[in-house]
Image (cartoon, rainbow, N blue to C red):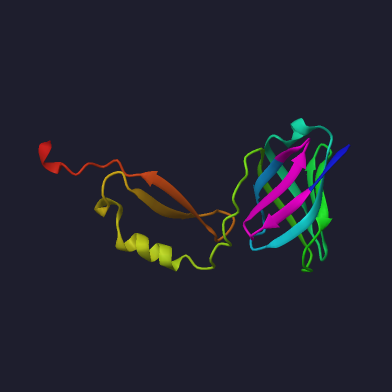
Amino acid sequence: MSTAKGSVQCNGSRLIATFVVDGRPRYIDADIKPLNQAFACDSATLTYVKPAQLDGACRWNGTAGRDDLQMDFGGGVSIAGRLAAPRSSIRVRGAGAWSTVKPILPPKPSSSADETQGSLRAHPVNSITPHAKVAREQPLMDSSVPIIAYALNPLRHDFGTH
């Protein structure tokens, strides 16, 4: 078994872990359930069998305990460490991907989507200029947190040419 030192940051919906494996940075960008479980572990230890295990998609489960973090990815891959601040203990799980590209942890999601919903209602899709990005929210099946999807609006406004 090999180990690497690093850190884990969680904003309550996304988890980013950073480690140095064989002299190169290695990252995991994953979701976390249940949501709103923000924490930090500034001194984490990644345990793995071979570096090839740290590529591509992964699933994990574990515990964000009162003082410690334990994440198990299966196959001998795990992350453990001491949390930066005490908290109530909770079982956590998620899915994500290992990468050599540094992800960016977005700010903690707001507790209300009312502003976004109001903005969408005030500007219907057909009133936006062509090729503008349009945001639409869809509720998740297993939680109340919205997913925001972006799509290009390829509609043309030359209605009289048909």
Q: In the figure, residue 42 lies in which quadrant?
A: bottom right
Against 84, residue 50 (above or below) is above
Residue 20 belongs to the span the image colors magenta: yes
Q: Residue at x 42, y 67 (%)?
A: 115
Against 152, residue 136 (above or below) is below
Against 62, residue 74 (above or below) is above
Q: Which residue is drawn at 57% across and 60% down?
A: 107
Q: Residue at x 70, y 34 (%)?
A: 55
Which region of the structure is painted magenta? Answer: 6-25
Q: Report the residue that reaches farthest toward the front.
A: 23
Q: Report the residue that reaches farthest toward the right.
A: 1
**Which quadrant is home to the C terminus?**
top left
Please give left or right for residue 29 compared with residue 118 in the image: right
Q: Residue at x 47, y 65 (%)?
A: 113
Residue 152 is situated, as x and y percent measured from the top left of the image, at 35, 43
Against 21, residue 13 (above or below) is below
